Image (cartoon, coloured by chain):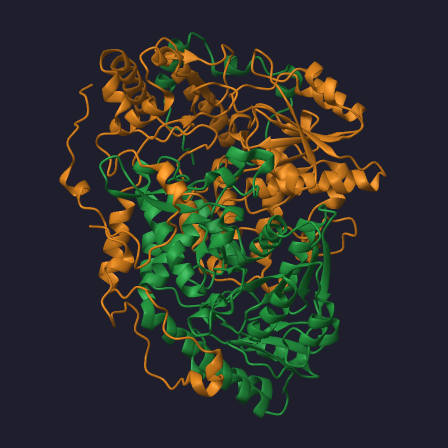
Chain colours: A green, B orange
Amino acid sequence: MRYTPHTPADQERMLRAIGIASVSELFQHIPQSLRERAKINLPDGMTELAVRRRLAALAVENVNAADWSFFLGGGIYNHFIPSAVDAMISRSEFATSYTPYQPEVSQGTLQALFEYQTLICQLTGMEVSNAAVYDGASAAAEAVLMARRIQPASRRRVLISRALHPQYRAVIATYLKNLVDIRLEEIPFDGTGGTDLDVLNERIGDQSMCVLVGYPNFFGVIEDLGQIKSACARVGAQLVSVTTEPLALALLKPPGDFAVDIAVGEGQSLGVPMSLGGPAFGFFTCQKQFVRNMPGRLVGATVDSEGRRGFVLTLATREQHIRREKATSNICTSQTLCALAATVYMSLLGKSGIRRIAEINLARAHDAKLQLIGQGKLSAVFSGPFFNEFVLRGEDLPQYISRCGGEKIIPGVPLDQWYPELRDCLLTCVTEMNEREEIDRLVRTIAG
Amino acid sequence: MSEPSRDKKPSQVAEPKLLFESSSAGRSAVVWPAEETGAEEALPAALLRDDIAGFPELGELEVLRHFTRLSQRNFAIESQFYPLGSCTMKYNPKVNEVVARLPGFAQIHPLTDADLLQGALALLYHLEKMLAEISGMEQVSLQPSAGAQGELTGLMLIRACLADRGDPRQKIIVPDTAHGTNPASSTLCGYDVIQISSNARGVIDSAAVAEVMDPSVAAIMITNPNTLGLFETNIEAIAELVHDRGGMVYLDGANLNALMGIAKPGHMGVDVLHLNLHKTFSTPHGGGGPGAGPVAVNAQLRDYLPVPRVIKNGVRFELSEDAPKSVGRVRSYFGNFGVLVRAYTYILSLGGDGLEEVSRMALLNANYIRRQLETSYQIAYDEPCMHECIFTDRIQHRNGVSTLDIAKRLLDYGYHPPTIYFPLVVSGALMIEPTETETPETLDGFIEAMRAIAQEAKSDPELVKQAPHSTPVRRLDEARAARKPLLRWGPDAPSGD
């Protein structure tokens, strides 16, 4: 393929206008030592047909949710996406535009992001949302950095629940490694699968900067945000909630109801394909008083010179392109197209639809857990309330997984790769994509 | 060329309402079959919320019409020439979109066993190798989500490597022409920033580096070609100097579109660079993401790359966390996989020879515009340009017309403006990057519009200063937006009528 439209006659005309004889003259000022070794040793280009065949051949080497039954969660969820979502984000006016620096010709993207910010505020019960960041993990890391800007230097201890997504904890550790004032401490989970409140209460103190917990957490368990907020409020630490399954917030009391200071999470559940975990977007919200410490893009409403409503990027003096080394973050993007997908998705579901789908997730997951335990081969590991994911233990787990594989079922994610103490444990997720019949098949297959 | 109308087109007059202003109680576009649910039985009532107050209630057609109308209020590559400097707004091929939506790429889960993801892992493995070849580096990590995260990752590698040598350092040298992300990423990595000035020819002198390159400096971050569109001709000498004094060289690869097949960063003495797949490798910008910002390193930094890594064991691809010196994870899962699929498709489509043609035509287009406009606008640096060229508003300023006015007037002519007021070292900068996918006819139309505006700036400066006249909204009150931030719709927000 070639996407360069220049004919030989075009090139000749342009070279003449420039006043040179060949394209190579345009880079004669680059040192010869570099030019002579620059050839790219890759095969020649392919036709579109050949490329599509090559890629299709790679795609079939992956097990996908259209052909197999997935009971996989752990931060990325298999949810139904109405056709209208892809139709909208495929419009080239959205897909092939840039960050809306010229607001007069970017009102489409800007208004959609303003609507996105509003929808996320409504869903989380928080006062302010930015226009999204890379993913849930970087959102969690950015939340800690934001707490560091808000809290005095005497508070630099960060308490992180061990029941927070392990990859998020890893990313937070990477982001903070070079900021030597910060101390990260893990708080264990207890038999409920939630953060151990006794340990939290014991460890939290006047040096604590913030506390991070999942809501629901990595085990699918709904943390007691009320109790955790009380512990934080008692000593003046900030509470950061991290949600990997935002559909849960259509049903659960949202973080804002517990006066959470910063509520972040992964938005993939809201109308974005799983796509091996990216691209999707991280949502990032906070209480209004902290808005000037936020990272990322913000869209605000204003008026034009004729008094009409319009939208612009605002509070940009927080950002890297203005503030450079003093910026609140280095982020320069907002995963806009994925945030747009979520905006269309939430608009289509609406108030009743989003609750209905959340209820179906909850009901089928609870039903599946009961049935799976009822077979006697698996047992529940945690006692805490859950939304659409739960942890089961079974001594012959590898055998069950392999038996499921034969039936084109992936029954969940083994947890021992992150939690040695959870050997033989499986994190199983049930969504509206798992029909009742499919759940029955999972139960039968594990029963053997 | 006739002057564009000052009148509104009827279709642009109606102001779209917000989603929340069009709701009717009980309406929804999604129907789910009846089934027993009963949230109250599964969970204690105290955990449950009420319906989400203010959430929209619309039918499917209304939703589609809403967003279709919004889309019509955007400029985009497929409808307008978009010569936004440093952003590489090239054509985003459709085949990339088709491929990324195959179920075997779009509907796969990152926590699936590696045995069931062999196609995806093969793609990641081969894409790493391709990017290493194009950039002349040893190894690549595809994990960073965007250029800025790639910068942060690259600096972390440098930091970890220097710490291992027992020579931790505190500072990063950043030229005054750098993208704002460079100093911001340095701070985030725990470094202090030393800014150096480029010389009268717009490039960095070895002498300027030598002056600040002491044992406290960990690295220099260089963009090449730099944001003035100029090749940093001293880069090899600078790299040698920095290395001799124990530092490293970071290359901001945002402008790689100028270099493919012309010069490889790996041969310039670069230790680590990031690549913006949403620029050089044609993945759509999406109105501000998602992108992808892989990092490429030389041999000495290889051990520090993020985990997990894709390795090949016989014919099988595996994931390895076995890298004791690794800086760790910089994001969840495998990065922006869907973006990586598109970039891989693009590279396969063009091949090595096609990529070389990309850079050659990008240079040809930029130099053509430069030559055609140099009599109407002041050129910032009279040096041969690479893939973009920088003008200033100096001539127009005599009549009180600024870069912002020129940019806004271009909207009336149907062109997206260049990047303006960047880089900061050029007063009133207009940074034009046409990319290789535009025909000379398109460039001629743009050139004609720019010349017409230069003429208007003399004959009718007010016309230019009041622009735009024909866009859906006119100049927006940004000061008001920042003074009283209104960041969400609410019952108290001003109405759309």
| Residue A72 versus residue B427 in the image, above or below | below
Where does residue A393 sit, x and y in percent of width and height?
66, 82
Q: Reply above or below: B282 against A362.
A: above
The residue at the point 32 percent across, 82 percent down is B34
Q: Is residue B45 above or below residue A130?
A: below
Judge whether residue B108 can be spotted in this image.
yes
Foreground of the two, B128 or B469: B469
* Location of the N terminus of chain A (image quadrant): top left
- Residue A3 percent location from the top left of the image: 40, 33
The outermost residue toward the right is B166
Residue B60: percent from left, percent from top: 25, 63
**Quadrant in the picture for the C terminus of chain A:** bottom right
Foreground of the two, B250 or A305: A305
Q: Is residue B179 left or right of residue B428?
A: right
Name the residue located 45 percent from the left edge and 9 percent from the top edge: A21
The residue sitting at 76% across, 29% down in the picture is B247
Q: State whether residue A196 appears in this view.
A: no
Instruction: Please state if B271 lies on the left or on the right of A269 as rendered.
Output: right
Which of the two residues, B169 or A267, is positioned nearer the viewer here? Answer: B169
Instruction: Place residue B27 in its image quadrant.
Output: bottom left
> In this view of the protein, which residue sits in the foreground, A269 or B107?
A269
Q: Kindly indicate the quadrant of the structure image that contains residue A123.
A: bottom left
Q: How many marks?
A: 0
Residue A190 position in % (x across, y down):
68, 78
